Amino acid sequence: MIKKLIPIGIFLIIGTVLCGCTQEKIVLKVFHAGSLSVPFEEYEKMFEKEHPNVDVEREPAGSVACVRKIIDLGKKADVLASADYSLIPQMMMPKYADWYVMFARNEIVLAYTDKSKYSNEINSTNWYKILEKPDVKFGFSNPNDDPCGYRSQMVLMLASIYYKNPKIYENLILKNTNIKFKEENGTYIILVPPDVDYNTNRILIRSKETDLLAPLEAGAFDYLFIYKSVANQHNLSYVVLPKEINLGYYEYADTYKKVRVDILSKNKTIVGKPIVYGMTVPKNAPHKEMGIEFVKFILEHPEVLEKNGQPAITPAIAKGKVPEELKGLVKIEN
């Protein structure tokens, strides 16, 4: 009689099914701003260690693009973290969200490497004159997709106001792109078309700011408007811009709001304000309770943000129908 050998693996599979030992992991989808990639990678590892039944899947992108995935493309996320907190109340509430927390700050700097032209000359007073040189190429992310992109436009317009030199914005942006601006009653309004065309000899644009890091480090262009935290995380040199223009300080909120950006493709207006990051769990999140747990985990560990050059807001400021699980960690404002 010939006996057929049944592979041991089959017995293991049958045994596992019969004893009900399989436990499917929860896949926690996190859509977040590209500038949060480094701290959120750390949060992912820490959270998964404490929650072995959870697989955190992060999708970094420009913050506007992150929100649009949910509200326009019908994609579902368990956590949404934006580099501009105001996108949540403006674009997601009340249909897709009913609360949010403001949990971190940042500022815009001008980053460069030792390959950048005039890197041995540039400083906090002459930076715009260096950018105006015809052989210098600078970059920023797409204002249609990414808050860092429209904030870069605000910084350059604020520079024209601060230095009392309207030629700064004209020479750097108006002459090299199809972006326009107008002035109304002391407010400077930047008009961003649906498709931004630009002079490729002078400017480089990508969807989100982190997409510009590799070409900067490779020497494909010279200077990049980017968040201070990202510059620190990637060990880049950078020029610290004046507080009056870098969007990093609450005490200059009245100065920042002199500039606004109109995103024409969305009929949306963004007023200049200090850079504050926002986070929420969308109303249609597949794993809402675990999403809240992830937000709570981040608020409980602000040191991760701090060591990555991103000042945490502690306690975080919360607005809307704040979940009970978070109330002990936040300051609720109306």
Image (cartoon, helix red, strand yellow):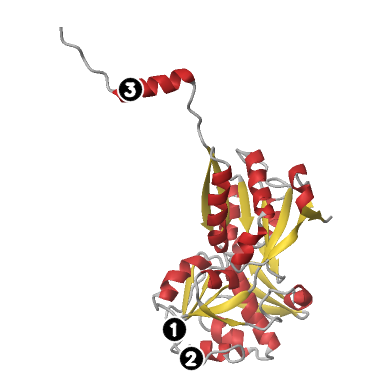
User: To which residue does mark 3 refer?
Assistant: 10
Q: Which mark is residue 114?
A: 1
The three-letter amino acid code for the residue at tag 3 is Ile
Q: CA distance from mark 1 to mark 2?
A: 8 Å
CA neighbours of label 2 inside 10 A, class few (<14), some (14 to 19), many (20+): few
Q: Residue at x 62, y 55 (%)?
A: 81
Residue extending farthest right: 334
Q: Can residue 76 be spotted in the picture?
A: no
- Of tags 3 and 1, which is closer to the observer? 3
Q: Can residue 310 be spotted in the picture?
A: yes
| Residue 254 to residue 74: above or below | below
The three-letter amino acid code for the residue at tag 1 is Asp
Q: Residue at x 46, y 79 (%)?
A: 199
List x then y, in percent, for residue 56: 53, 46
| Residue 243 to residue 314: above or below | below
List x then y, in percent, for residue 264: 62, 65
Q: Is residue 2 left or right of residue 61?
A: left
Q: CA distance from mark 2 to mark 3?
A: 67 Å
Q: Choose the circle earlier in sequence order: 1 or 2.
A: 1
Q: Which mark is residue 120?
A: 2
List x then y, in percent, for residue 249: 73, 74
Q: Is residue 70 left or right of residue 327?
A: left
Q: Is residue 23 left or right of residue 8?
A: right
| Residue 98 to residue 173: above or below | above
